[in-house]
Image (spheres, rainbow, N blue to C red):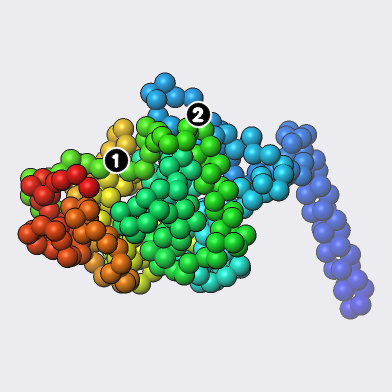
């Protein structure tokens, strides 16, 4: 009986050896076929890369990221990029630096980390700030503008203006616009607003547009989809408690309709070849902005009410149009210089 057990163990040992030999020779064949496959992966100097694109159409293009120097300032610029692209990892509810925001990333609204044409890009921030803004009635710095986004679009708490994070945000934003002459705004800056409709934007029609174009990414309840790391949003929420609040720029219908028209759905649409008509963009923006979201005290906004944009959705106003019309339109008859 012991001899049988010994023989079985010897056979098992021999079979294991055969498998090891076969695996070894298989790996050798793979290596001979593709010698690069087993080389260690090299870390790149930059955590991001977008090379400068030459354009014959006159549109702004971001600087080449390979030109960022290997200096403390360059390190700050790279950190700023990571804060814009992966805000939640650093500043979100589970942020490793602090818990200051709702979990969205800056680039959920400022596409491609603020470098996409008509994607709410940062191209003209460095060239035009500090500047007077009608919304606050004050001259604002870049730091104030960043905190506006943190408090409104990210429904969070303002950052200390002397913090490393704020300095990084500013360094990156200045770098993005470093090829724009002071006092100018390049072609393709910000958002492209579609033509006003002759009727009010219709949330009910917008719901149908949402079902056709938006639900596959943003979900049936506007809840969005998380990334694989379960911390960031691959597709951000469009309404509900984790979304931008009523003080955000995209809560103005013209801003949101323009953002949608030039960029959504983001896997098919471009500003040159949009997927939605003007009417669809206005209507789906109306539907999304009609849904519940966090509030914010904006009583100090637009101290000169005569300077409010026609689509600012909260009174009081210097005209006799209703708050509903200021929210949904039609805007043509209300248009005035702001």
**Where is mark 1, residue-wise?**
192
Query: In the rendered view, does 31 fall on the left or right side of 279?
Result: right
Q: Are marks 1 and 2 in contact (CB under 8 Å)?
A: no
Between disc 1 and disc 2, the foreground one is: 1
Quadrant housing residue 43:
top right
In this rendering, is residue 288 above or below 117?
below
Query: In the rendered view, does 69 fall on the left or right side of 273?
Result: right
In this rendering, is residue 152 above or below 187?
below
Q: Residue at x 35, y 52 (%)?
A: 133
Tell me residue 222's x, y (percent): 31, 64
Helix, strand or loop status at disc 2:
loop
Helix, strand or loop status at disc 1:
loop
Query: In the rendered view, does 72 fall on the left or right side of 16?
Result: left
Tell me residue 44's x, y (percent): 69, 43
- Of the pair 270 and 190, the residue shown nearer to us: 190
Quadrant housing residue 214:
bottom left
Tell me residue 260's x, y (percent): 29, 48
**Where is mark 2, residue-wise?**
53
Q: Residue at x 59, y 53 (%)?
A: 168
Count neighbours of disc 1 (C-alpha within 10 A) and say few if under 14, some if 14 to 19, many if 20 or more.
many
Q: Report if residue 311 is visible in the image.
A: no
Circle number at residue 336: none
């Amino acid at each position: 009986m012991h001899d049988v057990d010994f023989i079985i163990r010897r056979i098992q040992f021999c079979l294991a050896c055969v498998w090891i030999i076969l695996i070894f020779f298989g790996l050798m064949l793979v290596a001979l076929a593709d010698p690069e496959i087993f080389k260690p992966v090299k870390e790149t100097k930059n955590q991001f890369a977008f090379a400068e694109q030459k354009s014959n159409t006159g549109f702004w293009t971001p600087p080449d990221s390979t030109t960022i120097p290997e200096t403390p300032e360059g390190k700050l610029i790279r950190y700023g990029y990571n804060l814009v692209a992966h805000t939640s990892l650093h500043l979100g509810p589970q942020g490793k630096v602090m818990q200051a925001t709702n979990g969205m990333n800056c680039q959920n609204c400022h596409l491609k980390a603020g470098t996409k044409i008509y994607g709410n890009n940062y191209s003209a921030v460095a060239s035009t700030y500090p500047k007077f803004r009608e919304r606050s009635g004050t001259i604002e710095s870049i730091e104030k503008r960043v905190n506006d986004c943190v408090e409104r679009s990210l429904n969070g708490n303002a950052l200390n203006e002397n913090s490393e994070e704020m300095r990084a945000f500013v360094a990156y934003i200045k770098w993005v616009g470093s090829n724009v002459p002071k006092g100018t705004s390049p072609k393709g800056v910000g958002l492209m607003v579609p033509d006003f409709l002759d009727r009010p934007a219709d949330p009910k029609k917008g719901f149908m547009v949402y079902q056709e174009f938006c639900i596959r990414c943003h979900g049936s309840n506007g809840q969005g989809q998380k990334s694989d790391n379960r911390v960031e949003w691959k597709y951000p929420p469009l309404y509900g408690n984790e979304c931008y609040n009523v003080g955000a720029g995209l809560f103005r219908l013209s801003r949101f309709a323009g953002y949608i028209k030039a960029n959504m759905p983001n896997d098919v649409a471009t500003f040159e070849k949009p997927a939605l008509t003007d009417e669809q963009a206005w209507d789906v923006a109306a539907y999304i902005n009609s849904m519940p979201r966090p509030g914010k005290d904006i009583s100090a906004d637009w101290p000169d009410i005569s300077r409010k944009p026609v689509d600012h959705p909260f009174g009081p106003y210097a005209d006799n149009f209703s708050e509903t019309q200021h929210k949904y339109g039609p805007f043509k008859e209300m248009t005035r210089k702001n």
